[in-house]
Amino acid sequence: MVVLRYLKKQCIAAPSSCHRIFHHDCIGGSFIKRTVSSSSLSKDDDQKTVDRLAHDILGKPRFDKDGDSTTMRQRIALSKSITLVESKSNEKRLMADSLLAQLRNDPSSSRRAFRLGIAGPPGVGKSSLIEALALHILELDKNKHETSFCPEKIAVLCIDPSSHVTGGSILGDKTRMSRLSYHPNAYVRPSPTSGCLGGLGAYTYDAATLCEFANYELTIIETVGVGQTEVELANCCDLFLLLLAPGGGDELQGSKKGIVEVADFLVVNKADGQLHDTARKTANEYKKAMGLLRKPPRWWGSDENDCSNHTKSPPVLLVSARTGIGITELWDEIVKFRRNGEISGYIHKKRLLQRR
């Protein structure tokens, strides 16, 4: 009865020129109220703003008096659009829905980015690994990698925890990625969880879609520090990478259910210095556990030219974000995953399930 009274009150308060249907999405155990418009925007200014944002996100040239380049306008429009998507205002959410619909219907927005999700416990080095991996990708020689996946533009969406006391967020991930933030072909956007559980924000999927429309070929999504049950990232990305710390448990740690079961890659970070032997031992323990816990990956089965790389469990890799050890091998495995996933249709099926 309380829910019905609330919905009735909201519907009465909504303007008659803009009919809205309220429904709830359950994300991480929290119900998020969303608005879906059944008509066009009520204000001409809002519609002009949406049209301008869509025009700039798609990278179309504008013949006006301002001196901003197309790339700069695209970055500004992308930031404003993500702000609209994350807004809790009904009016802003209506503009965001109209913007996403307009971008999807545009004939020039046919490109699709690859989405890499990275999760792990607090302090494992997710931001450091993302910066090292992204800089490695951007510094690759495009002429030598013409036949393989070699993105020229990378977007990073960092989810930062919000305070349960004040409601604010530090949003310090961009500070940790200082070198990557200044790169002209990289876009780093920190966002708060706003009280949502599961490691992601309420509209991270929509933010990743906007980066895709802005022609970012690779979108990296970093979650907050997660535990064993936060698996929502698997419903938002093409490849789910779980980052682990050396010495983070005993032999039974890798056999536990939860996030380990849905991860496509397991990566042990900080494999350098005094922790190198410990990291190698941790990786071996997870390799043994994966051989018993996981079935053969479906995305290796359809590539006849790469049968030698068929594995019985997800890869368990050793990297060091500080020294760069293992970064090249990690990217090679990611490229191999994308190639086999595209050939087998695994990524396409996963995207369909995510949209549904």
Image (cartoon, rainbow, N blue to C red):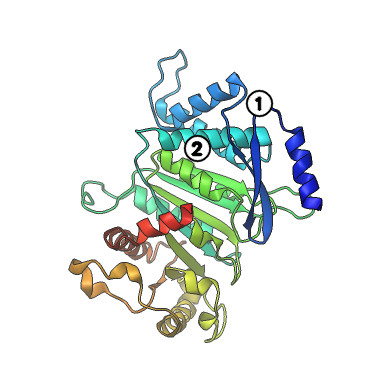
Given contact means CB atoms under 8 Å apart, are the residues at marks 1 and 2 in contact?
no
- Compared to residue 20, the image places residue 318 above or below, namely below
Q: Which amino acid does label 2 sit on?
A: Leu
Task: Residue 296: give x, y in percent of width and height.
Answer: 35, 77
Comparing 220 with 107, the one in front is 107
- Label 2 CA crowd tier, 10 Å (few <14, some 14–19, many 20+): some
Q: What residue type is labelled 1?
A: Ser
Residue at the spot 60% in from the left edge and 70% down from the top edge: 229
What secondary structure is found at the residue carrying circle 2? helix
Residue at the spot 70% in from the left edge and 54% down from the top edge: 195
- Compared to residue 279, the image places residue 138 above or below, namely above
Residue 17 got which mark?
1
Task: Residue 30: give x, y in percent of width and height.
Answer: 68, 57
Comparing 272 with 214, the one in front is 214
Q: Between tags 1 and 2, which lies in front?
A: 1
- Label 1 CA crowd tier, 10 Å (few <14, some 14–19, many 20+): few
Comparing 32 with 54, the one in front is 32
- Compared to residue 175, the image places residue 273 above or below, namely below
Residue at the spot 46% in from the left edge and 33% down from the top edge: 102
Task: Residue 33: give x, y in percent of width and height.
Answer: 67, 47
